[in-house]
Amino acid sequence: MISQQNASFRFALPHRLFWKENPALLLAISFLLGTSSYLYQLNTLFPLIWSVYLFSLHFPSFFRGACFLILGWGYAFFLHQDAPRAETPRFIQGIFSVSSLQPHHSPFHKGFLYKGTLRIPEALACSICLQGEERPLANQDYWVEGFLEERSPFMYTLKVKEWKGLSSRKTVWNWRLAETRYRAKETFRLCLQETTSPQTASLLGSLLTGDVEERLLRYEFGRAGLQHLLSVSGFHFALLIAFFSTFLGLLFQEWIKTYLLLFAVTLYFLFIGPAPAVIRSFFAAILYLIGKLLGRHPSALNLLGCSMLFELIFDPLLSGHIGFQLSFLSCAGLLLIYPLLSQYSERLLPKRTVFELANMTFPSPFGYLISTFFKKTLSITVAVNIALLPLLFYHFHKFPLLGLIYNLFFPLGAALAIYLLLPSLLLYEISPRLGKPLLFLTDAWTRLLLELISYPPLCLDRAWEVTFLADWGCGLYLFFLFFFLIQKRQKPVL
């Protein structure tokens, strides 16, 4: 009997230690299951397994998890209990507040996509697509009439019949950031078009703004498994912080540099807009920089949990967005799977000290550095795809094999293009003669990247297809995957 208790204790101890170190992640997952249970009729198997799992560890974890699960359900119920069910279009009248505006290209038409809140008088998340080059300004509220249709649970589209602006006397919150953001992005795109080739302007504009105007570009990135680069995420915020940190560190003290980075990150967030992956990356970057100011170094998993919790409080409906799911799951896979793969890869290619590298004969040190780079990028690619695989099959029913190859080098190539672009634009504004050579180099490098993605090897242009994957199968895969990873991550000494 005692031996069985000791075995059970040894089995549960790694998980107890993990959740003790990352309490924010535990609360965020519980809150996510609660909000999703109400908003999207989440399979009851998921919160049940989660509750049983926490109960098997110890009571404090179960109590905190159960409280936040119930709190998440109640929070979603409080916000969206009055949302109408409009599976078939019905005529409505209400006030539409714009939160974002971006170009929208269909196979036959060009137009604009407005996203925001529709009050009828219930507040609904709604989008409106308008065709043509003429558009209403996004800096005020509008009185709209049209046919409302539920595109997905609690997400609606409106086919507008009448669109009338409200003056400042009729609405207090008539100013919107969406118009300023749209004009700033258009100014940035125009600057790129004037200084680089159309292909380079299209790619770099999409990478830095998150708005993809070229359908062919989106198709080519999707075929190569690189569509995540077209959505602004932690990759872009990390590049921004690294770029400005390098230059600001030469001019200012550490604490002044950190405050300036906070300002730069916030400005970039306002420039991009509140997309799910952007909100997560922004919260994580802000918490990281504030931790530096306070002399605290929170764990990356706790930052991930805090970002998820803040984002769900900001808008629980974001949990149904594919970008939200891919963003958080890829980060979790990177933080939990990559260290394990890196540990195993050390057996094939052990680390070398600087002294050992110095004693190697030419060209062995360069071969070691190149193989180490590809070892790390391969481990990162495999780690992220192991976590995302069921979600990709569930939503898209296929996994492009090209992604395993292109993700080894293309993100680094895209990062280099951005690093070349930012200083070249700054130099060009100061002196066009100084900026043109660097812009020419940026243009040449970006066009090389486009050629690589436009003409991939035909023998690798294949996809692993799965016609159907149940939601419970996807959930069980992720649960047992991370259960195993937590078990392997902590190795307590008794």
Image (cartoon, helix red, strand yellow):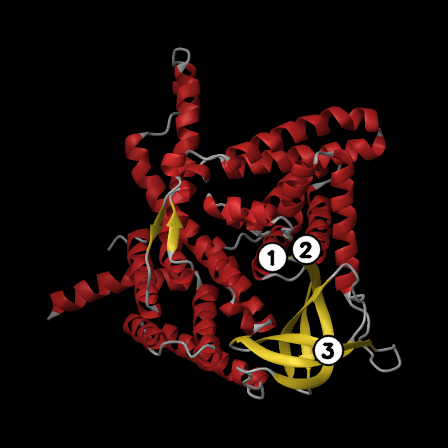
Q: Amino acid at mark 3?
A: Lys
- Which of the 4 quarters of the picture holds residue 437? top right
Residues under labels 1 and 3: Cα distance? 33 Å
| Residue 235 visible, this angle | no
The image quadrant of residue 418 is top right
- The quarter in which the C terminus is drawn is bottom left
Label 3 neighbour load within 10 Å: few <14, some 14-19, many 20+: few
Q: Secondary structure at mark 3?
A: strand
Q: Earlier in the sequence, mark 1 or mark 3?
A: 3
Q: Nearer the viewer, residue 427 or 156?
A: 156
Residue 160 badge? none
The Cα–Cα distance between marks 1 and 2, rounded to whole angstroms, is 8 Å
- The answer to whether residue 313 is seen in the rendering is yes
Marks 1/2 in contact by CB < 8 Å: the verdict is yes
Residue 327 is situated, as x and y percent measured from the top left of the image, at 50, 57
Circle 1: element type:
helix
Quadrant holding the N terminus? bottom left
Q: Which mark is residue 272?
A: 2
Amino acid type indicated by mark 2: Ile
x then y, percent, for residue 481: 31, 58
Mark 2–mark 3 Cα distance, whole angstroms, equals 30 Å
- Quickly name the residue at label 1: 278
The residue located at (48%, 81%) in the rendering is: 73
Q: From the viewer's perspective, is residue 71 above or below residue 312?
A: below
Residue lying farthest to the front in this orientation = 108
Q: Is residue 340 left or right of residue 449?
A: left
Q: Is residue 432 above or below residue 181?
A: above
Label placed on residue 161: 3
Q: Position of residue 296 (x, y in %)?
A: 56, 53
Q: Amino acid at mark 1?
A: Val
424 with respect to 432 (left or right): left
